Amino acid sequence: MYRGGDALEALHGSVPEWLLLLAALVTRLGDVAALISIAIVASWLLTWRGTPNGLEYPGTGSETDSTAPNADRAPAVWLVGVVVGGLAAMTALKYLFALPRPELVATTPSTLPTALESTYVSTVTLGGYGFPSGHAVGATVAYGALALAIPLGTRRSRLAAAGVLALAVSFSRVVLAVHYPGDIVAGIAVGVAYLATVWWLLERSPVDRTTTAFALALGLALVAVGVSGFAGRSVAYAALAAGGLAVWSFARPRSGRLSSARPAYHAESATVALGLLVALVVVGGGLQSVGPAAGLGALVVAPAVIRSRRASGSRRSSRVANAGPTGFRRLADSSRMTDDNRQLGVELGELGDQLESAEYPMSEDELLEAYGDEEIEMEGETSTLEDVIGPLNEDEYRDYGEVEQAIMNMVGDEAIGRKNYSDRTPPATGEDRQDEGAPDQDDQEGQESF
C-alpha cells in the first residue's frame, strides 16, 4: 500500500526547528487524553447550563442555533460516547491493517528546553501501528462533534473551525515524521465517515441520543478488544462506554404511577452493560484495569443524571411547544377538569397541536429526551411526561394523525374534557369542531387562557 513515503522523505530534514516545536505543541491537541477530556468538559458545561446543544433539525429553516425553534435541551453527554466510539473504531482499524510507522525520526531542536526533551523524544519515537493516523481520526471526530454540539454561531462556521483544527493536528504528525501522508489522509476520511454515520444514527435512532451513542461506542470498543487481543486501550474504551451506559440507564429518574411505561431498552441496555463489565474484569485484565475506566464512564453521565433528577424533583412543567389554535387544547374543557388533569390536558394539547400542524422539528424520541423528565401532576399523583407519552414509542406510526389517535386512545375522557368522545376520532378543525359532544363556544372561550 502506497502511503506517501517519498513525500515524507522529501519533507524530512528540511523542516525548520520552529515548525518542529510548533508541531510538537499542536499534536497534543490530538492526544487521546486531551480529546476525551475536552469532550467531557464540554458535555458537562452544556448539560449544567441547560443550553441548546446546537442540534439543527431538518425543516427549521435556520442555520443559527439560537434562533432554531425548540432547540434541543437534552443532556449533551452523548458527545463523549461519540468520541470514545471514534477512538475505538480507529484502534480496531490499526490492529486490522497492522502497518508500521515510518522509520524516520525527527531531529531534536537545539532551542528545546532541557525539561521538555524527554516529552519531545517520546512524541517523535512512538511505537505501535501507523495506519490510519489515530490523531487524525480522533481530532476529526472530537472537534467535528463539538462543532455540531456547541451553540455558537452557525454550523458552517463551527465545522470550518473544526476542520482547521483537525488539519493542523494531522499535519503535525507528518512534520514530526510519526506518520506517512497517506496515514493522515486515511485518518481524516475515516473520521468524517464515522461522524457522518453516527450523526445519521443519532437523528433516526428509536432510543434516546445518549443511549445510542454509548451503546455504539461499546459495540465498537468490543470489536477493538477482539481485533487487538484485549489490548489495554481497547479494554479501557469498552469499560468507559459500559460504565456510562449502565449508570445512564439505571439512574435516570422514572417516577409516577405510570412508571410501568418505562422503555424496556433502559433495563436491557443497563443489564447488558453490567454483564460486559463483569466479563471485562474476568477476562480483560482484572478490576484494576477495568475499574478506573468504568468509573470515568459513570462520572461522565453523572451531571446529566443529577440534572434530570433535579428537574424531576422541582415539579415544574414547561411548555412542550408553542401551541396553535387547533388540536387537543381546544378539546380540553377546563370547567370539567381537576387542576391536575387540566395541566395534563395542556401538555398533551400542546403536543397534539404541533403534531397536527406537522411543525414539530423533533422526532418523538428526541421530544422525550428533551422534556421526558419534566413532571405533570395528575389525579393527585406525579408522572413524568415520558411516563405518559412513552407507550406511544412502542408502536410505529405512519403520520402525526396516527400519533394523535394513540394519544386520544390513551387519555381518559375526563382528561380531555369530552365525555361523549367514544369513537376517539382525531379532532376536527375550524367550524367543524361544533359536532356532537364537542365543547360549545362559551366553553372554548375559557380554554384560551391556558
Image: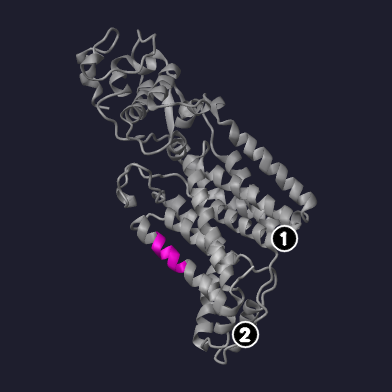
The reply to whether residue 31 is in sight is: no
Viewer-nearest residue: 156 or 330: 156
Task: Kindly identify the residue that appears in the image at 75 percent across and 56 percent down.
Answer: 230
Viewer-nearest residue: 251 or 68: 68
What number is the disc on residue 311? none
Q: Is residue 120 above or below residue 433?
A: below
Q: Is residue 32 above or below residue 73?
A: below
Q: Quadrant of residue 9?
A: bottom right
Q: Quadrant of residue 186?
A: bottom right
Task: Kindly identify the residue that appears in the image at 73 percent across and 58 percent down.
Answer: 228
Q: Which residues are magenta?
A: 159-165
Q: Is residue 87 magenta?
A: no
Gap between marks 2 and 1 measured at Cα: 27 Å
Residue 223 rendering spot, x and y as whole percentages: 68, 51
The crowd level at tag 1 (other Cα within 10 Å; few <14, some 14-19, many 20+) is some
What number is the disc on residue 232? 1
Q: Is residue 270 above or below residue 300?
A: above
Task: Kindly identify the residue that appears in the image at 34 percent across and 15 percent down.
Answer: 417
The reply to whether residue 167 is in sight is: yes
Q: Amino acid at mark 1?
A: Gly
Which residue lies most toward the front here? 2
Going from N to C along the chain, the mark reached first, 2 or 1, is 2
Q: Are marks 2 and 1 in contact (CB under 8 Å)?
A: no
What number is the disc on residue 117? 2
